[in-house]
Image (cartoon, rainbow, N blue to C red):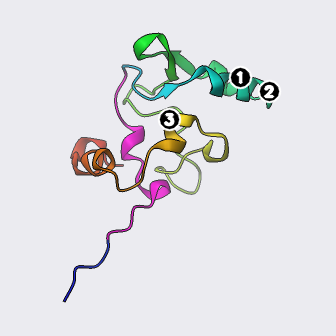
Amino acid sequence: MSEPEEVFDCLSCGACCRTGHDGRILVPEADLLRWRGLGRHDLVAATQPGHFGERAFATTPSGACVHLGTPASHNACAIYADRGTTCREFAPGSPQCREFRRDPSLRG
């Protein structure tokens, strides 16, 4: 009998959104421009200095992205429809995804 395929539901996990305080979830300039064009200046304001001279999503004192959590789920993304490129391109089930999910300190 074969093993059941693991399902990677991003909106019920959130492990990759709990990566720490040091600006790891990068926000490329193109996202800042897109958000300004959409009138989402709140998203631009909710960034902090990140790695490599780029902006990054701001984090809570616990190290989670400030956009993590909705009334429906503490693991869901509050800006999922407008999330940044880094988040959009992060592949569910990728080796990095699996690594985040294995780390008990990143589980919600």
Circle 3 sits in a helix, a strand or a loop, which is it? helix
Amino acid, disc 1: Leu
Q: Nearer the viewer, residue 51 or 11?
A: 51
Amino acid, disc 2: Gly
Say left or right for 28 vs 108: right
Is mark 1 in CB contact (under 8 Å) with mark 2?
yes
Residue 76 versus residue 17 in the image, above or below: below
Say left or right for 65 vs 44: left
How far apart are labels 3 and 2 at the CA level? Answer: 19 Å
Which label is found at residue 37? Answer: 2
Specify whether residue 102 is painted magenta: no
Residue 93 versus residue 3 in the image, above or below: above
Amino acid, disc 3: Thr
Is mark 3 in CB contact (under 8 Å) with mark 1?
no
Say left or right for 34 vs 88: right
Instruction: Estimate how packed mark 2 is, as few (under 14), some (14 to 19) or many (20 or more) residues with alpha carbons within 10 Å.
Output: few
Instruction: Estimate how packed mark 1 is, as few (under 14), some (14 to 19) or many (20 or more) residues with alpha carbons within 10 Å.
Output: some
Please provide percent x and percent y for residue 37. 80, 27
Q: Quadrant of residue 62?
A: top left
Q: Quadrant of residue 20?
A: top left
How far apart are labels 1 and 2 at the CA level? Answer: 6 Å
Please provide percent x and percent y for residue 58. 50, 23
Circle 2 sits in a helix, a strand or a loop, which is it? helix
Q: Which residue is mark 3?
A: 86
Q: Which residues are magenta?
A: 6-21
Say left or right for 27 vs 15: right
| Mark 3 or mark 1, earlier in chain | 1
Q: Which residue is mark 1?
A: 33
Circle 1 sits in a helix, a strand or a loop, which is it? helix
Please provide percent x and percent y for residue 91. 42, 50
How far apart are labels 3 and 1 at the CA level? Answer: 15 Å
